Image (cartoon, grey):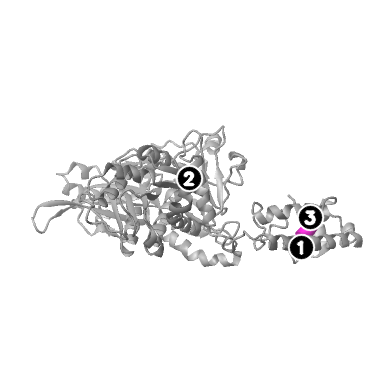
Amino acid sequence: TPLQAITSSPSSPMSDTTSPVAKKARKSIDVCAPNDERVGRAARMMLSNPTYSVPQAMLAQDFTEGESKDRALQQRVRRLHSKLEKSATGVVADVKDVKPAAVVPAKDFAAHIPLGLKACDFLTNSTDPFLAVKTCTDALDAAGFVKLSKRDPFAGVLKPGGSYYYTTNHSTLVAFNVGHKFKGGNGFKIIGGHTDSPHLKVKPISKRSGSGCVQLGVECYGGGLWHTWFDRDLGISGRVLVRNTDPETGKEKIDQRMVRIAKPIARVSTLCIHLQTAEERGSFKINKEEHLSPILGTQSLLESGAKAQLNQFDDDDWRKAQEPALLKLIASELGIETKQIANFELGLFDIQPASLGGIQSEFLNSARLDNLATCFVALESIVDYSKSEDLADDDMISLIALFDHEEIGSQSTHGAGSPVMAEAVKRITSAFCDVVNVEAHSSAVRRSFVMSVDQAHAVHPNYASKHEKSHGPKMNAGVVLKTNQNQRYATNGVTGFIAREIGRKANTPMQEFVVRSDCPCGTTIGPIISSNTGIRTVDLGMPQLSMHSCREVWELPICRMGCPSLVLSSRTLTKSMKAWRGEIQCEVVG
């Protein structure tokens, strides 16, 4: 395009072809080079790369070697280059509404890498929904949030300016800040996400063997790209129920313990190429029941230890059905005896840590980005806002809700289809009312807003045709607004406008996503929350590649304008907590 060369420099103020600067520059450039497009391209190449000489630029634009030596042509290129340079400088000077914060030189984005590394630590430690919630609650405890018990009344406990959290099933989290000026009936600013991701879960009867190997019985959770789980070093994590004795009463009690064994204890191996037919090599079809059972070890080495352990557990049918070596490993990790293990909910994970990638570390490579990326930015947002001076003038509740079971439909006691969200609004509102007030809850619902933030499908350069031409989000180009007229996403005209306004006020680039009409559209928690609660909802996302793979790719944080989108996601959500209530709410009524 006419702007391509002049805007290709990362430090150029016109590096975003959709920006006001680029749009105003387009006419000037077209006027400067209306006739000989090759001359124009050569001049623009010199602008984008000052190290180019005139002959070099001309040769790069399909001039012959003889033409590149033509002095008359060289003079034309120089004159046009001069005009373009002046035009570009003038256009930039005329644009008064360009915010400096929106343009960060590429060399400065390294300052945001520490936050990217912090995200890597979060993702590496959050190997399943239980560990994800534990990682969050550890951070909330450190930030001074007060843990609530859902069994006890909130009234008398919640105070203006306070910060609180509670969990459901240890895999769903609700955390919130109370504005200093909040009163019962005021609104809620909510960020919704989910803690679960597709993975292999251990079956109730985990013991399995075949051909001299000790294996693990597993079940596919969610819709994973299961071929990506082959030949990975797999660890195991989750929740373990442990039998203990209450020191005060002497009675037996059951404790819930979280375990994370980041060792390569299991592996799903690929069948070697020599034992596959040409058709099998071309298709790589997987039978999820027969081909995904990981190998733990060999029977000859584990058999004697297994028999010894089984003799100890003759009174417990559940333990008899488990692989003894696995029970022993879990007990060792938790510092307990194997006979104390009463039950577990475990899943496998790739032990490779999250890492920065790309030639300039502009990407973040990790498992479970869908949707722990949202969990991370939501957590950063709520913690940052709890320390903000803006909380003193806030008359609303700022809340994050991170649900389990999104990948399998959200219909559970602690998924987005459960009473968790509606109950949170009702109980927090009631805690600030002197008497039971049904109208206060209804008022709060009408004054609230939910940002359902899940990951979004970035355009894959090798499969660009899979995206709708005008609605293809790009990596490092901003937050994605997701729309589907069949309500697979909750975005409508009003909520989409509000999201764009928040992005505009926070100086955050926004992208649009609509799935192709000949492709099925995924869904997320947005429509579920909006239909269950009646709260206005918008579905947003952050672009990524390889969604539902064992290893996914996220934008670390530098979008095309130089803005770190990971930081922007966090800061924008933080800013939305204050931006929504005033000017935007007045603009949208009804």
Residue at screen point 58% across, 60% down: 102
Mark 3 lies on residue: 41
User: Identity of the amino acid at label 2?
Assistant: Val
> Label 2: few (<14), some or many (≥20) within 10 Å?
few
User: Identity of the amino acid at label 1?
Assistant: Glu
Disc number for residue 588: 2
Q: Is residue 304 visible?
A: no
Task: From the top left corner, tell me how far across and down residue 40 is, in percent.
Answer: 80, 55
What secondary structure is found at the residue carrying circle 1? Answer: helix
**Closer to us: 300 or 156:** 156
Q: Residue furthest left?
A: 249
Residue at screen point 49% across, 42% down: 494
**Is the residue 524 above or below the residue 174 in the image?**
above
Q: Nearer the viewer, mark 2 or mark 1?
A: 2
Q: What segment is highlighted magenta in the picture?
A: 41-47
What secondary structure is found at the residue carrying circle 2? Answer: loop
Disc number for residue 85: 1
User: Identity of the amino acid at label 3?
Assistant: Arg
| Callouts 2 and 3 close, C-beta under 8 Å | no
> Label 1: few (<14), some or many (≥20) within 10 Å?
some
Q: Is residue 230 left or right of residue 49?
A: left
**Is the residue 551 above or below the residue 520 in the image?**
below
**Is the residue 235 above or below the residue 101 in the image?**
above
Task: From the top left corner, tell me how far across and down residue 186 is, in percent.
Answer: 35, 50
